[in-house]
Image: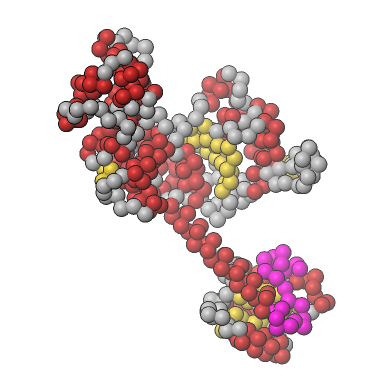
Amino acid sequence: MSTTHEILVVDDDVLVNEFFEEVLKRLGHSVTTVASGEQGLQLLREREFDIVLSDVKMPRMSGIDLLKQVKIESPETVVIMITAYGTVKDAVEAMKLGAFDYILKPILPDELEMIVAKALEHRQLILENRILRSEIRGRYQFENIVGADKKLLSLLETLSSAAKSRATILIRGESGTGKELIARAIHYNSPRSNGPFVTLNCAALPEGLIESELFGHEKGAFTNAIKQSQGRFELSDGGTLLLDEISEMPFGVQAKLLRVIQEREFQRVGSGVSVKVDVRLVATTNKNLENEVKAGRFRDDLYYRLNVIPLYLPPLRDRLIDIPALVDHFVRKHNDENRRDIKGITEKAMRLLLAYHWPGNIRELENYIERAVVLCKGDRITDSDFPGHLVLGKLASLSTTSGNKEMTISEMEKVMIIETLERHGGNRTKASEALGISSRTLRNKLHEYGMMEPSESAVAGDDDSSE
């Protein structure tokens, strides 16, 4: 083998140690043998081993006792138990305690090679998972959440304390404001960060399935229930469960959810046996739950249970100060993902982003930046790299904020032009046809509103196909 692995053999039988040492060294491994559990544990505290092969029956410290200590002090080391036929029961018990496999004496060299190879593959997966979890944890550190808006900074201060608790958290905010990002940051900055993070979109499931998705079901509980299935609560035991868009949860299921929160146990669909769980619950909503309670669509007792630590994510239009930093972050991110080297964004393009009203919030901003990074022909994003309706951002903002207030004919004309352009994706040729005016007149109007550069309005013709 091209890679040498460190293997420790612990057995009080000298002949067994010599056999394992001979076979494993022939396979290219570095092998150390000792005759007792105490010696093995001491070596494990001094050096790192990939695999430990340990006899089950040894005087003083048994293989089971050694296994328990290895799992505490070096949980990534893979342990294989060595056993005679009469102690197979002990070896099976060891596997329940975390042993990878067991070897039954006597063993053939080919069988030993196969078991060790599988153990090394398992060890590699453990190491890769550790690296991945470290990268994920780093990605969701609170300091990596982009923004300098005062409301966001105040929210992050609250998050730091809230993450350390086991209290239920309710995150409110419009779609696209980053509620799931905050939920993941809470999990990966909590004592549960090594546990699972499980999500359930309450709006994506029909009422007949959501109970089974939450609590699982027994075989035969309903049509097509061909086997027992674990629900999201069971899968997130020891970790965090995110209930996305909790306001969409059916009223009848809300009562069962309330019981799980109160009792920390549930029953699978079709079962009368209670299952205990230790789950940190985070819920999100883009609706006003107080209004949902008043309307009779959401239980008030469940609302109070969820609203222990309330968090509110402001929409992007209320934190425009963060747009430059977010743009920089998304440019770097999508440069990496698309192998581009975009240096930044022009001042005019940034003005357009700052003028837009962002109904889709941060998610919409990222989509536009990703599109611009992919399609940009130079080394800096310009206004022409954005969709047509973004180029009319300042006017679009007027259209969406005018409400029912009285407007002059000139203002109404602006709104009409804006809405028509948005319906046609910013294509000036199609918009001018729909408005019954010439392309030249439309260009002049946009120039009058300050939404076109002088050089643009002076160009003969109107090639809108690029928009």
Left or right, 433 with reference to 346: right
Residue 95 falls within the magenta-colored stretch: yes
Residue 106 versus residue 244 in the image, above or below:
below
Q: Is residue 7 above or below residue 207?
A: below
Horizontally, residue 208 falls left or right of residue 30, namely right
Q: Quadrant of residue 119?
A: bottom right
Is 351 in the magenta?
no
Residue 112, position as x, y percentages in the image? 69, 79
Horizontal arrangement in the rendering, residue 156 relative to residue 293 (left or right) = left
Q: Residue at x 63, y 84 (%)?
A: 24
* Residue 56 location, quadrant: bottom right
* Image quadrant occupied by the C terminus: top left
The residue positioned 64% from the left and 71% from the top of the image is 118
* Stretch of the chain drawn in magenta: 92-112
| Residue at x 28%, y 37% (from the top left corner) | 384
Q: Is residue 157 above or below residue 456?
A: below
